[in-house]
Amino acid sequence: MERRTITLLITVISVALLGLVLIQAKWVRETLALRDAQFNESIDNALLAVSDRLERAEAREQLRHLPGGGSQQIGNAPAWGDTLAGNAVPGDRLMDDLLRGLFTAGMLRNIHDRIDPRLLDSLISEELRLRHIPYAYRYGVFGTGGEVVLTGPGDASDTAAVLASRHRTRLFRNDWLLDQPDAPSWWLHLDVPAGPVVLLRSLWPMVATTAILLLLIALVFSYTLRTLFRQKRLSAIKNDLVNNLTHELKTPISTISLACEALNDPGIPRDPGQVAMLTGMIRDENKRLAMLVENVLLSAMTEEGGMRLRLTDVDMHALLAEVVRNSALQLEKRGGSIAMQPDAELAHVRGDRTYLTSIFYNLIDNAVKYCTVPPVVRITTRSDAQHLVVEVRDNGIGIPRGEQRKIFDRLYRIPTGNVHNVKGFGLGLSYVKSVVERHGGNIRVESSTGGADQQTGSRFIITLPFEHGEEDPTAAVRR
């Protein structure tokens, strides 16, 4: 996939994801505003209902105390008995005057006498419950100038908050004296402190679900991008592998072909020394081809989980001494050297001797290949109660810090452009890591690069666990 296509894909998906986030945020905000409006409206309706019921309760109380047929006048209304006896006032006007006198008598009472705190509290509680607002509340009755008549549940310090509440309604709205300029008015205020918190809590499941879904989309998007870039990188690595493989195979094939032609050319003298040189060349190049094929097969076997370890008791000091002895000639041809410093007090582990041997040959081979001066390799061991640590140090060109985490990846080689001065396919260290991990251990590298004349080198540190137990050479296979 081209870089332009990938960039366009990332941009489109990012814009779509951002759009979803903005839409969801707008939807949550509008839903919260709608529920807040509904909540406030329910409280205001509850206050109106409380005011009406309180006024009707006062009217019923006045009617209950009305004389049965006496001549007492109530306010400016005619006496009940006189009016009926003389039929001086029509029926509708009689009732109007009667009620006017009744309510006028109520208006003239002290406000503390007109409001029963227990009744008011009961009415507020019931109206809020009917509207599904079963939360803690505070209320108060205040005059026009803010003077306190009474307050509901809560501390005296809450009075200011109740007075400042947006939820209020006028009490005794049908008082006729309200039309007078100096007529007093009384206001019922209600404060529900938990209102905003309750609203947010009611939206929490929706907000949490939305956030989880958006997070899942973002994670899938990130995983897709990561997979896409990984596949792109693997594609580049495989292309590099094909180029390296072609380059690596051309040399031994050409050498073998030239040697065969020389042996078959009657014009070339066939003295024993010449024949031995040509056959030796064919043998060496054939071994090289076999090693290349073996590396590819070992890597494929490791990747597919086909590695079978036959566990035995392995003396790592003896194993490393053998590796050092067999590798000495290779380094001496380059003017270098190899040495071992066995400092570990415990050096026996359970493992597969063949595979353990091969990983150290791989590390030594890399140390020789990636060195521009006579190679010097030092192998040291140390141990504690749980682990054996083997350190392979070289004086090579070093590994850039940014590449150190990638060198153990299969098929990965440090980019060198089109220069193929170091042969290989990027399989060796991946194989080494697989073998070490199959033995329950781990491997890490410490390295730095210097200038053209500075050989800093690398340190490969392998940690293998001790597995004390029976030393049965036919131990079970570890898969």
Image (cartoon, rainbow, N blue to C red):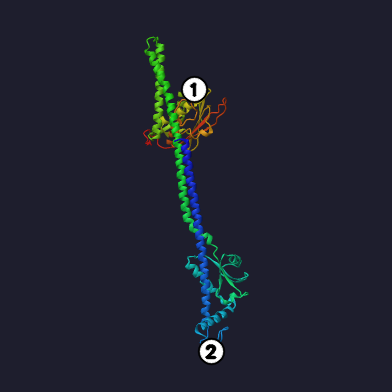
Q: Position of residue 169 (x, y in %)?
A: 55, 69
Image-based side of 262 in relation to 366, left or right: left
Which mark, residue 82?
A: 2
**Toward which corner of the image does residue 159 lie, by quadrant?**
bottom right
Image-based side of 289 in relation to 462, left or right: left
- The answer to whether residue 284 is above or below residue 131 is above
Q: Closest to the observer: 429 or 232?
A: 232
The quarter of the rendered structure image containing the C terminus is top left
Kindly identify the amino acid type of the residue bearing the numbered disc 1.
Answer: Leu
Q: Position of residue 452 (x, y in %)?
A: 56, 25
Determine the residue positioned at 46% across, 55% down. Answer: 206
**Toward which corner of the image does residue 241 lie, by quadrant?**
top left
Of mark 2 and mark 1, the one earlier in the sequence is 2
- The answer to whether residue 129 is above or below residue 292 is below
Image-based side of 326 in relation to 73, left or right: left
Callout 1 secondary element: helix
Residue 43 seen anywhere in this rendered image of the structure: yes
Residue 200 seen anywhere in this rendered image of the structure: no
Kindly identify the amino acid type of the residue bearing the numbered disc 2.
Answer: Asp
Q: Position of residue 404 (x, y in %)?
A: 51, 33
The quarter of the rendered structure image containing the N terminus is top left
Q: Closest to the observer: 361 or 138?
A: 138
Q: CA distance from mark 2 to mark 1?
A: 138 Å
Q: Closest to the observer: 295 or 174?
A: 174
Determine the residue positioned at 57% across, 27% down. Answer: 451
- Camera-nearest label, 2 or 1: 2
The residue labelled by disc 1 is: 331
Q: Residue furthest bottom?
A: 85
